Image (spheres, rainbow, N blue to C red):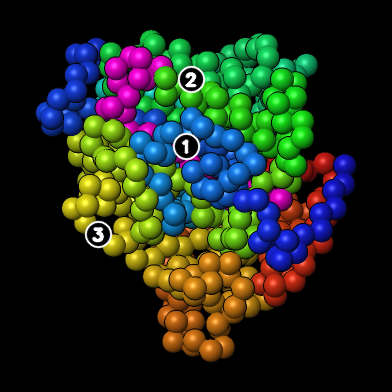
Amino acid sequence: MKYIFHLSIFSLLFLACKGETSQQVQTESNPEQNPPNIIVIVADDAGYADFGFMGCKDLETPNIDNLANNGTIFTDAHVTASVCAPSRAGLLTGKYQQRFGFEANGTGYGGSGDIGLSDDVVTMADVFKAHKYKTIALGKWHLGGTETDHPNERGFDEFYGFIGGGRSYFPIKNPSYEHMLQQNGKQVVFDGYLTDVLGDRSVAFVEENKNQPFFMYLAYNAVHTPLEAKESDLEKYKDAPRQYLAAMTWSLDENIGKLLKKLEQSGILDNTLIFFMSDNGGAHNNQSSNGILKGWKGNEFEGGHRVPFIVSWPSKIKGNQTFNGLASSLDIFTTSLAAAGIKKDGTLELDGVNLLPYLTHEKTGNPHDKLFWRKLEESAARAGDYKLVRLENFGSTLYNLSNDIGETKNLSQTDSLYYNRLQDELNHWESKMIDPLWGEEKPWMDVTYYIHKQLMQNKEVLYKAPPDKDDQQ
Ligand code: CA
């Protein structure tokens, strides 16, 4: 199928927005005696402006808003990549994925070669499992399809989900390996709607493990394409301008609500550290909105990597807070280790920062002075308020986000001091990374390059997807 999208920057501005341990008792004891559960909830391709807590009016997310109200909302939090796979690689390893060559989005599946998470890279699950946490990955994996890439080989005691980058929300007849729903490597058959199935599994896992510390990586494929929703939710939103996205988002929210309720009923919500985020910016192909941010999934403007982000830990972090400091999904690993009182092995090098002192007001300011991004031919650097966006063989643009969050005014000619400084910073960072271990298919490369170039020139984007590849990112 071919899709043609006409989008202008102007119109974007108007888009709506194991070892058994003792029962966990709420005490002020040190974390090692009362380690918190860790839950990382990842939405897929959800827009910066597409949740109630981010100001959205036409999509409803009462449960996620409730999580936000009981925690801290981040306004300047970023993922390490503007597409699914490398973003998840950065999140789960706590280091820039370019350090181990995981830069392209296509990870290859079953027998396609050693494309995916390199065997020597340590994941969050590896560390928590080694510290007697029960670990589970639910939903989308997308970190490679070879045997050594499987979640059960990467620190997760349990895996219930699918290996690839996307799939139908309904049962598929004769699914391929990457689309097959599986539990620990064995195909499972499900009825109903996948978002409900994953929500139910998250609740069942809490019931089974509520008396011991656990780490849950809950990676919903909602609201990634294909746009598929339950009839009842479509009926609920039959008059909504973004009917499918509203219905899919409602189901996502409903299932996160089920998990929160289960944690509360089990008496462990207060001592559970929960992160909520989208794996990249809202996509051009699922009706999502990044609000005033420029661009979307797949490029290095804010719309590609600035994401909705919540941290909640009721027993330690006051609710109803908004945090405007510069933060990253890289921080999830480091923050979780600190919360659990786990001392980092000296050989484990992480790029993240412990966010807890910022959320308890022991520290102020930005957790990161700088952040960097690179996806093959596109790269970007952020230092303070300034952001540099570079496109290979084309040029670079500079923005001051403090007064131009929409990246509309290119300051590369007028602010040469910052322009040169950020070029140097980006070059220095790149010199510490390795070359990508694999690349992207040419049709995607051409399309993303074209889009990026148009955006850098603040031009209207006429987007034409390569045939039959619309669901692969
Ligand atoms: Ca994604």
Identified by mark 1, the residue type is Asp
Quadrant hosting residue 6: bottom right
Q: Is residue 7 above or below residue 427?
A: above
- For the residue pair 342 and 64, the one nearer the viewer reads as 64
Going 46% across and 71% down the picture, which residue do you hit? 402
Quadrant hosting residue 379: bottom right
Going 65% across and 12% down the picture, which residue do you hit? 190
Quarter of the C terminus within the rendering: top right
Q: Secondary structure at mark 2?
A: helix
Q: Which residue is mark 3?
A: 364
Q: Secondary structure at mark 3?
A: loop
- Local crowd at mark 1 within 10 Å, few (<14), some, or many (≥20)? some
Identified by mark 2, the residue type is Lys
Residue 440 in sight in this render: no
Q: Which residue is mark 1?
A: 65
Q: Which residue is mark 2?
A: 258
Going 71% across and 66% down the picture, which residue do you hit? 10
- Local crowd at mark 2 within 10 Å, few (<14), some, or many (≥20)? some
Q: Are marks 2 and 1 in contact (CB under 8 Å)?
A: no
Q: Label 2 vs label 1: CA separation?
A: 14 Å
